[in-house]
């Protein structure tokens, strides 16, 4: 495979070398099961405890509030299904910007007698607080709002949304998978009852994440068994991945301020250049993640542009990686009022720690070449 | 930590060096999300596909029949909850020998209107087919029977049990987590609709497992989202762990015959020695895994013996690691008719690929010393 410039960090991130080093002893030498009572088991348990403290500190909670899961999708499902399971069926509210792993389990609650409401977005991709207030009037059981959008990077005003939903009686959750590692997270400040994290979005390993829960949240386990994770998630602890997750959180916190400023400057330069090329940058009027630019060029198909850029050595996303095989325009863009034709042109740049300014210069040159070629093609086709 | 002889392979196993080597490229260089459409994503997808073929070949099925999960507990829960979700509530039958991650979700189905029956065991730990036949008379919706027991190592006659349960209308599952890697598994030959595997029990990484499903099994996803795993299990694929799981299956298959014979000889020698010491070996009259010896010495507390052996440098289990913190006697032993006092003495040796004959000699000497000490203590205490 040719080397490529990886500009798809919202899909996943390479594991940091320091994270890998921390994980290394737990594959073989210290491979015991943390539930075992012998010394090897106790050592594994201590490693899990230490990582739980790191993850807890990362979002400002007590270690006992961290429930390790296999990732963000499981954490989101655990909240929606687990909170609904211990409540009388009523309204579940999610926004039109949610990831499929919130949207689908929310819709699934209809089978258990829940009514599902979708809160709209404004043209910049922000969740419409007035719409939420209107839909919440009759009371809400469960609600979930994404903290930072995986495609647009748009940040939501979670404290305000959580206030409204909690006042209506809801257990409120935020999917903070894309926010974590890019901007500071203070659980108490967000005002939610639960929050999802995923290690592989912040240079930790795949296969590990967490649902962080408020102390008063009532929840039912969705994987039952040996009573792991305070009885809320059974299964042998994934010790190396948990250790890696903890270290990834520490590294992210240590580098966040500097990286955030660096990436914001890179992003702003890219946005300017794209707009000069005639591209539409989605959510450009909203506060956004420092690393994400979601854009489209009128008349240029996103999938085609993506392939041309890939051929030129640049790996980008077309939106949510998890839905990238179905070629439908992003539901989030449609909910923002973007015309389907333009939405079909959407391409996402998401930079990361290893992205150098020079790589983005190369990317801009490659994009200009690709666009010239594709526009030429389009004019020939017309 | 002092070096110790690890005789607790049924709790977990060290990752094989060849497995780690295979996983290595997928942490950073090839860290893409398999759902991404660019070349890096396609390469990750190919790695997942190749591992799926290895796991499928390991149990004699087509790759599309393998649903990757975060491990055995999730796989067992997926079957029980997922199969029940698409069936009219009726009877769910499990045996008295099941792991907590089968027993508890089965009991949980009562909330959805299911009736839960537990099939008894004979004195050797075998599931009582006559009891199953009697309980299945009125029809069964969902059934699950453990293939090889984690504590006793006793093998069940899954084809016979599955026949009875399927004839009564059940979707039948077997938890083959402890059998996999120790004895050959042929999915079709077992006659079940689904089967659970866990990589970390066969020298693969923690955090990955699979539910292997029959082509006609109707099942509902328990983690919904981006449509991964044929829509049956959402979440970004844990690429390194999946790759490691595939290689671990290949290695286990390649070494199984030789290791099985070697471990059987070691086990038989140990059983003889233990019986000569006056120990009771549970399930000694039944066909068992080649690596497992579950025993007790009358008048000697299992937890105390375990700690003494740990102090002497030998890591053993007291039964299911997942329940090892609650100090209650094994429900499986009680179901076999073992007196609670004797059951509280139970200690498990589970050997592995790296266990040398000399280590078991050392273990026997250490055990004799520990027992002499503890018996002396007991006689003083009396």
Image (cartoon, coloured by chain):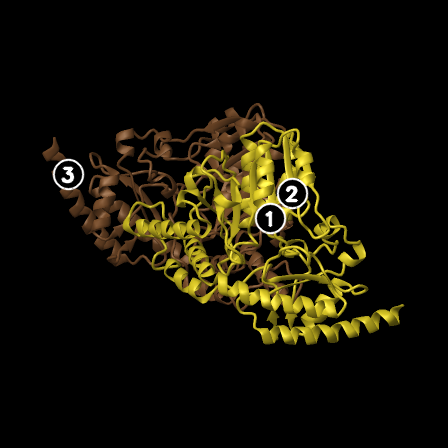
Chain colours: A brown, B yellow
CA separation in Å, label 1 and label 3 = 54 Å
CA separation in Å, label 2 and label 1 = 10 Å
Secondary structure beneath label 2: helix
Q: Are marks 1 and 3 in contact (CB under 8 Å)?
A: no
Mark 2 or mark 3, whichever is nearer to me: 2
| Residue plotted at (79% across, 71% down) | B374
Where in the figure is residue A79, as x and y percent of width and height?
55, 40
Q: Is residue A61 left or right of residue A283?
A: right
Q: Nearer the viewer, residue B50 or A60?
A: B50
Mark 2 or mark 1, whichever is nearer to me: 2
Where in the figure is residue B317, as x and y percent of width and height?
66, 62
- Using the image, tell me which numbered label, if any, was put on residue A234: 1
Q: Please indicate, yes or no, whether residue A205 appears anywhere in the rendered image.
A: no
| Residue plotted at (67% across, 66% down) | B271
The residue where tag 3 is placed is A375
| Residue plotted at (46% across, 28% down) | A118
Q: Are marks 2 and 1 in contact (CB under 8 Å)?
A: yes
Q: Residues within 10 Å of mark 2 (few under 14, many from 20)?
A: some
Q: Do pointers 2 and 1 mark residues of a single chain?
A: no
Q: Residues within 10 Å of mark 1 (few under 14, many from 20)?
A: many
Mark 1 falls within which chain? A
The residue where tag 2 is placed is B104
When the figure is inspected, residue A13 is found, relative to residue B163, above or below; the finding is: below
When the figure is inspected, residue A321 is found, relative to residue A90, above or below; the finding is: below
Looking at the rendered image, the quarter that the N terminus of chain B falls into is: bottom right
Query: Residue B234 lies in what quarter of the image?
Result: top left
Secondary structure beneath label 1: loop
Query: Residue B174 lies in what quarter of the image?
Result: top right
Where in the figure is residue A127, as x and y percent of width and height?
44, 33
């Amino acid at each position: 495979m040719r080397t490529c410039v990886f500009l798809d960090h919202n899909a996943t991130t390479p594991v940091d070398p320091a994270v890998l080093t921390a994980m290394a002893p737990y594959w073989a030498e210290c491979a015991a099961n943390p539930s075992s009572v012998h010394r090897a088991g106790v050592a594994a348990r201590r490693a899990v405890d230490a990582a739980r403290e790191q993850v807890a500190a990362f979002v400002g909670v007590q270690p006992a509030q961290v429930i390790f899961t296999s990732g963000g999708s499981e954490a989101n499902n655990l909240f929606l299904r687990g909170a609904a399971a211990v409540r009388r069926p009523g309204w579940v509210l999610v926004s039109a910007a949610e990831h499929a792993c919130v949207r689908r389990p929310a819709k699934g609650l209809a089978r258990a007698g829940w009514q599902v409401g979708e809160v709209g977005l404004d043209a910049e991709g922000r969740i419409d607080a007035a719409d939420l207030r209107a839909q919440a009037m009759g009371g809400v059981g469960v609600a979930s709002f994404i903290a930072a959008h995986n495609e647009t990077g748009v940040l939501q005003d979670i404290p305000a949304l959580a206030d409204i939903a909690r006042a209506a009686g809801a257990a409120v959750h935020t999917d903070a998978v894309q926010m974590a590692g890019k901007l500071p997270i203070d659980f108490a400040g967000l005002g939610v009852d639960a929050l999802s994290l995923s290690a592989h979005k912040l240079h930790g390993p795949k296969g590990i994440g967490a649902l962080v829960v408020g102390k008063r949240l009532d929840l039912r386990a969705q994987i039952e068994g040996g009573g792991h994770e305070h009885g809320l998630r059974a299964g042998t602890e994934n010790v190396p991945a948990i250790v890696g997750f903890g270290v990834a959180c520490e590294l992210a916190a240590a580098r966040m301020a500097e990286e955030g400023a660096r990436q914001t400057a890179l992003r702003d330069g890219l946005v300017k250049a794209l707009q000069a090329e005639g591209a539409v940058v989605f959510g450009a009027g909203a506060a956004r993640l420092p690393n994400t630019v979601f854009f489209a060029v009128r008349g240029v198909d996103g999938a085609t542009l993506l392939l041309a850029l890939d051929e030129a050595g640049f790996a980008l996303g077309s939106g949510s990686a998890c839905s990238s095989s179905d070629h439908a325009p992003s539901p989030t863009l449609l909910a923002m009022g973007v015309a389907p034709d333009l939405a079909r042109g959407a391409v996402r740049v998401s930079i990361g720690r290893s992205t150098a300014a020079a790589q983005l210069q190369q990317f801009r040159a490659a994009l200009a070449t690709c666009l010239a070629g594709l526009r030429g093609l389009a004019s020939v086709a017309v």
